[in-house]
Image (spheres, rainbow, N blue to C red):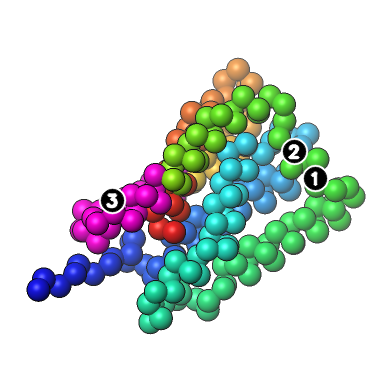
């Protein structure tokens, strides 16, 4: 009887490492934009609210998805729960600092702007298609094939690179451009939402 192919986790890292890194990247960008004064022109892109759902998915389901092998090392070899603790402490620290620095609640900054509402359908479709499609595809008979596991690795890289590109444009490029010259990220953010959601879905 042929031996089943071994499961290779993306980039050769312990199970859950890429999801942990993506969750931290999403949270860090959200924290950074929240702390920048609103009068500087830094709003919180709507797609980050959708990707926050992926952070919550990582937070609540990550342990179950890697528990099949008790000998599997935790993400990046760190103590189990490290990234959950970092997300909780980081969020608490950012919210506390916001209240201290601006002497007001951060809740108004967490309400999407009216001009962002047109993006809801595209982002919702991208997230649902990515998460649902990834979940279903990740349970097919091909999930142990070398091609599929290599494909997962490439998707993980695309998701991380996409978040880096988004961060650079939002924090460093668009603020230095005139309003009519700013990079329109609407389509890009929908694609990025789909890619990140797909990866979380296929690895959940």
Q: Residues within 10 Å of mark 3 (few under 14, many from 20)?
A: few
* Whole-percent x, y for residue 53 in the image: 58, 50
Q: Earlier in the sequence, mark 2 or mark 3?
A: 2
Q: Is residue 192 among what the camera can see?
A: no
Which residue appears farthest toward the left when viewing the image?
Answer: 1
- Which residue appears at 48% of the width and 69% of the height? 64
- Which residue appears at 52% of the width and 30% of the height? 122
Q: Residues within 10 Å of mark 1 (few under 14, many from 20)?
A: few
* Whole-percent x, y for residue 158 in the image: 38, 46
Which residue in the structure is indicated by mark 1? 107
Which residue in the structure is indicated by mark 3? 151
- In the picture, measured across the screen, residue 109 lies left or right of residue 119, that is right
- In the picture, measured across the screen, residue 44 lies left or right of residue 151, that is right
Q: Quadrant of residue 60?
A: bottom right
- Which residue appears at 48% of the width and 36% of the height? 126
The CA distance from mark 1 to mark 3 is: 39 Å
Q: Is residue 160 magenta?
A: yes
**Element under disc 2:** loop
Which residue in the structure is indicated by mark 2? 111
Q: Is residue 175 among what the camera can see?
A: yes
What span is colored magenta in the figure? 133-162
Residue 55: image tag: none
Q: Residues within 10 Å of mark 2 (few under 14, many from 20)?
A: few
**Element under disc 3:** helix
């Amino acid at each position: 009887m042929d031996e089943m192919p071994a499961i290779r986790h993306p980039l050769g890292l312990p199970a859950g490492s890429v999801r942990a890194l993506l969750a931290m990247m999403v949270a860090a960008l959200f924290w950074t934009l929240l702390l920048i004064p609103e009068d500087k022109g830094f709003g919180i892109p709507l797609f980050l609210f959708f990707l926050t759902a992926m952070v919550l998915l990582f937070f609540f389901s990550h342990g179950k998805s890697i528990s099949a092998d008790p000998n599997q090392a935790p993400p990046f070899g760190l103590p189990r729960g490290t990234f959950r603790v970092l997300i909780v402490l980081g969020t608490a620290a950012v919210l506390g600092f916001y209240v201290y620095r601006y002497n007001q609640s951060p809740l108004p900054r967490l309400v999407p702007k009216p001009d962002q509402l047109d993006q809801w359908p595209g982002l919702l479709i991208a997230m649902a298609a990515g998460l649902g499609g990834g979940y279903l595809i990740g349970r097919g008979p091909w999930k142990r094939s070398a091609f599929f596991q290599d494909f997962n690795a490439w998707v993980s890289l695309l998701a991380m690179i996409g978040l880096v590109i988004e961060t650079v444009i939002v924090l460093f490029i668009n603020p230095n451009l005139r309003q009519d010259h700013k990079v329109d990220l609407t389509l890009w953010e929908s694609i990025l939402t789909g890619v990140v959601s797909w990866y979380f879905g296929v690895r959940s």
